[in-house]
Amino acid sequence: MAHLMGVVIEEFPDQVAVADASDDGAVGFALAWVTDFDSRRLHEIVVELLVELMEHAVSHAEDDVVVEEFEQQMLQFDVAAFVDQYRRERNFDDRHDTAI
């Protein structure tokens, strides 16, 4: 999570605030992030950034077939539909895993 939010902060530095409480054992968390985005938009941004990282990694492949296949799959990939489906199907296990 920290690495993903680091990527989000890098792309949107003025829209993310971070509180580091790693030295305070009484609060129950080490880092907290607050964004100008609602949770759904943040979810879309994270998926979009992960896809960009994957595209960059695949671009270094020495196999043109793999690169072409990945590019074709990404042309068909719908971030909003993926996020909708994921959010419908996710299953939180306990009371601490609910959205705020």
Image: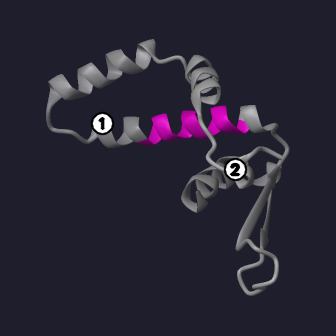
Residue under the image location 20 percent in, 27 percent down: 66
First along the sequence among labels 2 and 1 = 1
Is the stretch drawn in magenta largely helix, strand or loop? helix
Measured as percent of width and height from the top left, residue 46 is found at 60, 40
Residue under the image location 56 percent in, 33 percent down: 48
Secondary structure under tag 2 reads helix
Is residue 65 magenta-colored?
Answer: no
Lateral position of residue 73 relative to residue 44, left or right:
left
Secondary structure under tag 1 reads helix
Number of marks? 2
Looking at the picture, which amino acid does disc 2 mark?
Asp
> How much space separates mark 2 and mark 1, taking CA atoms?
36 Å
Measured as percent of width and height from the top left, residue 21 is found at 77, 78
According to the image, label 2 marks what residue?
97
Residue 45 or residue 100, whichever sits in front: 100
Residue 20 or residue 13, whichever sits in front: 20
Measured as percent of width and height from the top left, residue 34 is found at 82, 54
User: What is the magenta range?
Assistant: 42-53
Q: Is residue 88 above or below residue 96?
A: above
Label 1 Cα crowd, 10 Å radius (few <14 / some 14-19 / many 20+): some
From the viewer's perspective, is the residue at label 2 or at label 1 nearer? 2
Residue under the image location 34 percent in, 21 percent down: 71
Looking at the picture, which amino acid does disc 1 mark?
Ser
Q: Is residue 78 above or below residue 7?
A: above
According to the image, label 1 marks what residue?
59
Lateral position of residue 34 relative to residue 3, left or right:
right
Measured as percent of width and height from the top left, residue 90 is found at 59, 34
